[in-house]
Image (cartoon, rainbow, N blue to C red):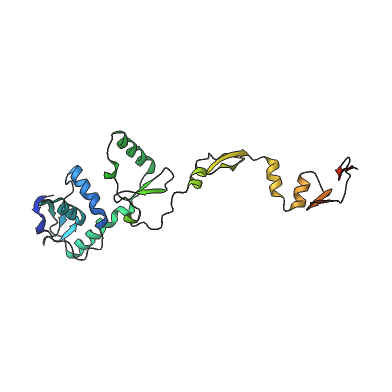
Amino acid sequence: MIVTDMPVETLVPYARNPRNNTAAIDAVKASIAEFGFRQPIVVDEKMVLIVGHTRLEAAKALGLKTVPVHVAEGLSPAQARAYRLMDNRSHENAQWDDELLRLEFGDLKLDGFDLDLTYRLVTVDTYGRITAGSNPTTLAGCGITDAQPLDATLTALAGLSTVADRLPYATGADTFALATFTAFGRSLLDGADAAAARTTLGLGSMATQAANNVSITGGTIDSVTLDGGTF
């Protein structure tokens, strides 16, 4: 593959480029400034861009006079058009391995490397939730308008270790713990109504209470003090 340095003014952006790359220019500028120009721009035989619109705009913003260019000779207009679309969309078929990605970011952080140079869109926590934007620094700047904000309550609940027969309960504002959920507790909650709960508790139909009075419907009660008297 032949790559030649060419003046930026000789290259012609494709007028019908369907990819809006404006939001990516700053990140590519930072990449070129840090790593150099490592990927050539690809043009057809008329110097019309096929691949590299963002790199060209970043180079202009950096004040570069020349950029590395490869002329894709022999492509038909249809092939050039298909190549242009494929290059812009091929990354959409790839997926990140989150565990390996965390390892890479971890090593870069230990090396003191500026992580803003390694990605543009968003920062996520270990649960995959969006917590901030990066290059640009806002979610709206990344074109994300429907992200759920980080919720302290959900974060606290997500931090609990799921164990069998445990029930979460609040210990304070956005703090939670786990209590043992016994078989008896499950059977009590399984009751369809108050009568079933009384049966589970061993009360049967002996007593029901409404407001401040008690009516006896079955069984016996010994030594109950009511209004100062013992019965």
**For residue 82, side relative to residue 231 (left or right):** left
Nearest to the observer: residue 225 or residue 165:
225
Q: In the depicted view, which residue is nearer to us: 141 or 167? A: 141
Would you place residue 149 above or below residue 80 in this image? above
Residue 19 in which image quadrant: bottom left
Taking the image as shown, residue 31 lies to the left or right of residue 148, namely left
Q: Position of residue 189 (x, y in %)?
A: 69, 48
The quadrant of the image that shows the C terminus is: top right
The residue closer to the viewer here, 194 or 222, is 222
Q: Is residue 190 left or right of residue 229?
A: left
Q: Position of residue 184 (x, y in %)?
A: 71, 41
Q: Residue at x 61, y 39 (%)?
A: 179
> Residue visible at 29% across and 42% down?
115
Give the quadrant of residue 147.
Answer: bottom left
Q: Residue 13 appears in which quarter of the rendering?
A: bottom left
Q: Is residue 23 above or below residue 164?
A: below
Q: Is residue 16 left or right of residue 162?
A: left
At horizontal 69% and vertical 49% (from top left) the residue drawn is: 190
Q: Position of residue 61 (x, y in %)?
A: 17, 53
